[in-house]
Image: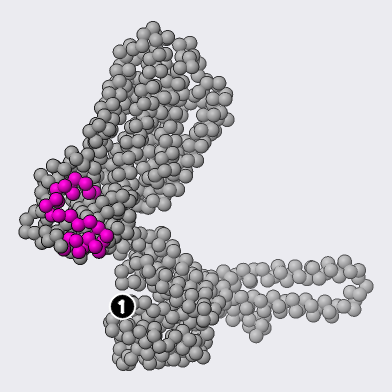
Amino acid sequence: MNLILIGMNHKTAPLEIRESLSLACGDSINPLIEIMNIPQIKEAIYLSTCNRVEVLAHAVDEESAVEKLKSFIFNHGNLSPDDMARCLYLYYNHDAVRHLFRVASSIDSMVMGEPQILGQVKDAYRTAVEHNASGIMLNKIIHHAFRTAKRVRTETGIASNAISVSFAAVELAKKIFGNLQGKTVLLIGAGEMSELAAKHLLNYGVEKIFITNRTYARAVQMADNFHGTAVDFEKLQEKIHDVDMIISSTGAPGYVIDVSMITASLRRRKNRLLFLIDIAVPRDIDPAVGEIDNVYLYNIDNLQEIVDGNLQIRKKEAEKAEAIIDEEVTNYREWYNTLEVVPTIVSLREKMEGIIRGELAKSGAWMENLTEEERKNIEGLANSIINKILHDPITGLKEESRENGALPYIAAIRRLFGLD
Amino acid sequence: MELLFLKAALVVYLISSLGYMCSLYVRRVLAAKVSTWVLFAAFILHTVFFALRYWKTGQPPVISLHETLSFFAWAMAGIYLAFQLKTKTRVLGAFVSPPTFLLMIVASPGLGGHVSLPGVLQSNLVPVHVILAVTGEALFALASCAGAMYLIQESMIKNKRTSGFIRIFPSLTDLDRINHICLMWGFPLLTLGILVGSIWARTAWGSLWQWDPKQVWTLTAWFAYALLLHQRLAIGWKGRKAALFSLAAFVILLVSLFFINIFFVTAHTFI
C-alpha cells in the first residue's frame, strides 16, 4: 500500500534531539509544505509533540521517498548519521498503520493513557487537510485511527484512575464527598505537592481554601496564589471544626494534629465526614486519628500505593488495548485488500459486457425479424447468464482478499480471462 | 394474559440483576447503566401486570401474601428508579435488583390464581393499609441497601483498599443521603400504614391493638426507626453509625415481615 512512517519518540531519541528537530520545524519552515514538495510523496501528515516527531506518508516510490524524508530530517535536525540510525524508526504499510493506531490510542505515550495525544493527532490531520496533503489513503487511515483510539478509551480502563499522588487525593475526595462543590479545604504548611493537590481540588469545584502556616506572612502569600484565606496558626483548632478536608505538609518534627484535636471538634462538626491528607515526612497527623469514626486519614505512602496500583492496572489494560489495535489493524487490512481486487472485478465485468455487446451486434441481422420485446428478452437472458457465471468467482475473490491477500487469484483471473 | 407480563417481568428482572453483577465484576459503570434501563423495562412489565390484574379482579392486587411480596418488589424497583432521576447512583442497583428478583421468585407461584377474600378483608381500608405499610418498608429496604453499600465502601476506604470494585461505587455522601431520604419518607408511610391497620382492626376484631406477635415486632422495628430518625435529625448522626443502625432496624422489620408468619401463631395470617 506504499505507506511510510518515519519518526522518533521519547523511547528512541533523547530530548535534545527531539527538541532541535521540532524547533526547527516549528519556527522557520512549514514542514508539511517541504514534505509535500518531495515528488515521490502523494499524501503526508506531520505530527510533532514534546515526545515525538513523526511523518506518515503515502508514496509512489518507497525507497527514494524514504531517502528524501531522511535527508529532510537530517537537514533540519542537525543529526549525525549515527544519531539518525539510533533515533529514527521506520515502518512500512501495515506496521505503519499499527504504529499510528498505537500512537493515537496513547499506548505509545510516555504516560500511557494520557488524553492529549489524540487531540494532537487530530490537529496534525487538520493541518494536513488544510494543506491538501491528506487524500483518500490517509483520510481513511486517520479516521480508522480515531475510531481505534475511541474504542481503546471506552473499552479499556487505560485512561481511568489517577497516576499522580495529587490526583489520587482528588479521586479519594470524590469517593468520599461525591460532588466537591461547596466543600472547603485547609492547607497546613507549604509544599509543592499540597499546592498541586489544592489546585486540582479547586478545579473540581472546591469552594474555599484556607491556608495556615507557622509564619503568617507565608500563609498570606500562598493565599494570594489560590484566592484563598490565610488563617492564623493559633486558630487551627477552630478551622478543624469547619472544613471538610485538611492537607498537611509542615516541616514540624512532631504531630501538628493529634487525636484530641479531632475528637474535640466532632460534636461541632455534627459528624460531618473529614478527609485528612498527611503529605509530610515526618508525619504531621497522629495515625490514630484515622481510627475515629467518619474521619479518613491518608499519608503519602498510602497515596503512593494507590498510584502504583493504578499504574499496574494501566499496564494490564494496555494488553487489552493492544488486542483492540490488532483487531482494528486486521479490519483495516481487510478493507484495504478488498480495494486491491476492485479493479480486477471491474475489468472482468467490462470484458463480459463487451462480449455480450459484440455478440448482440453480430446477431443483429437475424434479430431484426424479432419484436422489440423479444430482443429485450434475449439481452436480459444474456446478462443474467453472465451475472450467474460471475457471481461465484467475484464472491470468492472478495473472500480471499479479506482473508489471505488475493494476489495469486487476481493474477490467475487476469491471465485466464485475458484481462491485461 | 397478565401472567405473560408477570413471567416477562421475572425474566427481565433476572437479566438486570445479572447485568449489575457483571458491572461489579468487570468494574465498569456502563454495564450498570444498561442494567438500569433493563430494570426500568422490568418495572414497566410489572406495572402492566398490576394494572391488568386490578382490571380483572376489581381490587388492588396487594392482599394475599404473594401479592404483597410482588408489590414490595415493585415498590423497591420503582423507588430505586425514581432516585436515578436525580442522583445517578447506578451501581446501587447491584444491591437492589437481585433482592427484587428473589422476591419475585418467591411471590410468582402464588400470583394470578383466583383469590377469594374472606369477608373480614373485604374492606377498602385493607389495600390502603398494605400499600402504605409496604411502600414504607420498601423505602427501608432501599435505605439498608444504601447502608450496606456505605459500610462496605467505608471499611475499604478506612483500610486503604480502594482499588477493588468499590471504584465504581457511588460516593459515601451520596449513599448516606439516599439512606437519609429513604428514612424520612419511609417512617411516616409506615406510621400511617400501622394507623390505618389499627382502624381496620377495630372494625374487624373489635379493638385497635391485639398484642399479636406480628404487631409487636413491627412496633419494635418502628421504635428502632423512630430512634434512628431522632439521632439523625437531632443529634446529627451521619455515616457509619447511621448506616449500621438502619441495617439493624431492617433486620427486625424482616423478622416481622417473613419469619413471624412461619414460626409464630399470628392473627395477621389471612391468605
Where is the C terminus of chain B found, in terms of image quarters? top left
| Residue A238 part of the magenta segment | yes
Q: Please give left or right for residue B151 compared with residue A137 in the image.
A: left
Residue type beneath disc 1? His
Q: What stretch is highlighted in magenta?
A: A218-244
Residue A64 seen in this snapshot: yes
B115 versus A131 height, above or below: above
The residue closer to the viewer here, A74 or A356, is A74
The residue closer to the viewer here, B244 or B70, is B244
Residue A257 position within the rendered picture, expressed as x and y whole percent measured from the top left? 12, 51
Q: Please give left or right for residue A338 compared with residue A362 in the image.
A: left
Q: Main secondary structure of the magenta part?
A: helix
**Residue occupying the far right of the picture:** A369
Q: Mark 1 lies on which chain?
A: A
| Residue B234 part of the magenta segment | no
B127 versus A366 height, above or below: above
